[in-house]
Every structure is written in structure tokens, then in C-alpha cells.
Amino acid sequence: MSPLLALAPVVCGLLAVSALFSAAETSLTGASRTRMHQLERDGDRAASRVNRLLGDQETMIGAVLLGNNLINILASALTTEVLTQAIPGPWGVAAATAVMTVLVLVFAEVLPKTLAILRSDDVARFLSGPTLVVVRIFGPIIYTIQWIVRRTLGLFGVRLNMELDVLAAHEEIRGAVEYHHSEGLVEARDRRMLGGVLDLSDMDVSQVMVHRMTIAMVDADLPPRDLVTQVLNSDHTRVPLYRGDPENIIGVLHAKDLLNQIAEAEGDFKALSIEKIRREPWFIPETTNLKDQLNAFLKRKNHFALVVDEYGALQGLVTLEDILEEIVGEIEDEHDITVEGLRRQSDGSVSVAGTVAVRDLNRALDWDLPDEQAVTVAGLVIHEAQTIPKVGQTFIFHGHRFQVVKRLRNQITGLRISPPLETKAER
């Protein structure tokens, strides 16, 4: 039998094994970890093997690459040996190189990796068993190679840390949401909700709290009838109580507790005792992040907290609803006013009170104004202008035109904001 004919099935077999290695490498690195974990919880043994391989991804990739290179080099060496007998001299080597380059590139690299990219999860589960065997066989060699690599990189001051980067995981999730939203697979509302969950640990309560200037509070020394009237006129079920100075918060009054005591007193307001039903106020620092505060609300079963600065001065209040609204959007009831202080104009612009929160404005109009440096719209304008603007001054930043309409002493109370200028120009 001709050496070429005898070589053909051997090379085809080696290329087939090489193709499996290439498909395993691509599919395992591209498999969805979320789906694999879910399948493992459902009892899928193949998904369990995939998760074991991904748990030590560096070793897995090293073992697959080692096996793949051994196969490709062996196939190339055999082909060169046979072709140099048929075509003596350097032309035989050149012919072997050309033939194996085409065969390896097409059948052992591009073809299997293309399939693995298209069906990453399925291919990864199918090849997880053989790959696990390869990792066990080549494991000791790979650990030695890793040791050499780390030592070599260490000479240049490079330190490898294979621990999971939580921030990178968050950004990966955020990127996936943004990608699927751009493809039309995730609705804008769902995108904001998922983004809101990821943003909780990056935001402080000071960014969502009700500012102290707009807190509805009641003087605990008022006559009982006047106090009840003020509580009933409030849009909230929990109202802070102060004595003497609004900064001196002595407790929180729950409307339900008040109504229960009125019922027990059979409507006799003189028999009411605020001291008996007021609840102890819960003070939290303004630097508390929303994720921690959400957990604290759930743990203490208390949905109302007062926010203070480092000197203990009252800055505002935050509720469980305020935090949930960062995830699901505005939670409105019959007493709420949708983004109070926001009024749309016929020309597409909006009139905005300076106290409107930037995040509320973004949610209401689907804008993307930054809220890292300022909580309110007035604060954003002052931050960007680096001064307190006068009435009539106009600024353009972040794709919008801001015009100061009202100002009370040093406080901007009214602005007119144009729609996104790019959108306006396109129309």
C-alpha cells in the first residue's frame, strides 16, 4: 500500500481529535455559567461536569491546548515524513506545511469552533466528559507549566490572581442586559429594573432620600386635635415628630397607631397620649449604601429611617419604598403625584422644579442625565456651571439645554430643559 494512502486515515483521525479539542475549548469558555448552574440544580450531570471544569478554567484550558498541540504537531510530523519521501528536499517540507495548514485551519480550527460558538451550551455539555478525562491525565503537567508561567511573569512584577472579580461579574451581567436590550429582546422597563438591582450597592441613601426641606413632620406639642388634623392631611402613614426645633426628632408617629388610640378613646381627643404611641426614631448615616439599607429594613422589619450626616444633623429620610422604586420605578397610589414639579411643554421641553431628583427625571422621560455628582436637577446645573446661575442664563451639557427660570436667593427653584438635542436635530 502506498505510504500516502496509509497515512490518510491516520491524519483524518488526528484531525478529528484536534477538532474535538478545539470545539471543547471554545464551547467551555463560551458556555453560559448561569444556565449551567440552573441545569446542575435540575440534576443535569453534564452541566455539573461543565461547572467543575469552569471552576478551574486555567487548568482546563491548559490541558485542552496541550492535547490539541500534541495532536496537530504529530499529524504535521507524520505528513512531513511521508511527503518528503515522495517529494525529496525542501519542496516536500513546503508541500507538507501547505497541506497541513489548510487541513488544520479548516477542519480542526474554523469548522469546530464555528459550531461551538453557535451551540456553546450543548457542545460544552456533550464534550464535558472527554475533557474532564483529558484534564485528569494532563493535570500534573499543566500544574508544572502554570508554576513555570507564574514564576516567569513574577520576574517582571506580574502577579496572577485567579479569584472571581465581583465587579467584573456585575459588569458582565450589565453588558448582557444592554446587549439584549439593543437586540430588542429585553424591554426598556425590564432593563431599568435589572440595572436598578445592580446599582443598589453603588448608591448611598443620600441619593434617594427625601430632603429635610420637603419632609412633612409634626410638632409633638400641638393640641391632640390639631396634631390629628395634620397627620390626616399628610400623604404619608409615618410622620416624624419633633419638639421645639424641627432638627430635634423625638419619634415617628404611625397613622394606624393614632387611629387605634382614637378608637380606644372613643373619639375623645383629650384622652390621646402621643408619648404612648410614638415609635423610637431610627437614625442612619448618609453614606449607607442602598443594598445594606435594604437588608437592614428587611431584618429590622422597619420601613422608615432618618438620615443624618457625620455631625448628627438631619439630612432627610428614606423608606423601603424609596429603595424599591430604584428597582421597579415609581410606586404610585391614590395620594401620589407623578414626579411632582415636572410639567411638559408643547415644544417638547419640560419645566422642572429645582428639587426634582435627577433619577426621577430620567425615569419619567427616559433620559440619561448623570446623577453621580448631584441628586437634584438644580444641584446638577450648579455642579456643571461651577457657580449659582442667574435667572435667564442658559447652559448646554449632557445633550440638553438648561435655562434657569426661577431663583430664590441662592436656590434655583425652576428650570426649563430641552429634549435631547440630537433627537431634536434628527426630527
Image (tube, rainbow, N blue to C red):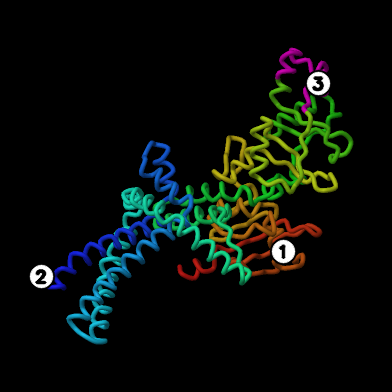
Query: Which amino acid type is marked by label 3?
Result: Lys
- Give yes or no for residue 33 being in the magenta stretch: no
The secondary element bearing badge 2 is classed as: loop
Label 3 or label 1, whichever comes before in sequence order: 3
Query: Disc 2 and disc 3: Cα gap in Å?
Result: 105 Å
Q: Is residue 316 positioned above or below 18 on the image?
A: above
Rendered location of residue 204, percent (x, y): 69, 49
Q: Main secondary structure of the magenta part?
A: helix
The magenta span reads: 260-279
Please report the residue visible at 62 percent of the width from the left and 57 percent of the height from the top.
351
Q: Which mark is residue 1?
A: 2
**SS category of the residue bearing label 3:** helix
Residue type at mark 1 is: His
The residue drawn where x is 38% and y is 36% is 43
Q: Which residue position is annotated with label 3?
A: 276
Residue drawn 81% across the image and 59% down it: 409
Q: Which mark is residue 383?
A: 1
Distance (Cα) linking label 3 and label 1: 46 Å
Q: SS at mark 1? A: helix
61 left or right, relative to 96:
right
Residue type, numbered disc 2: Met
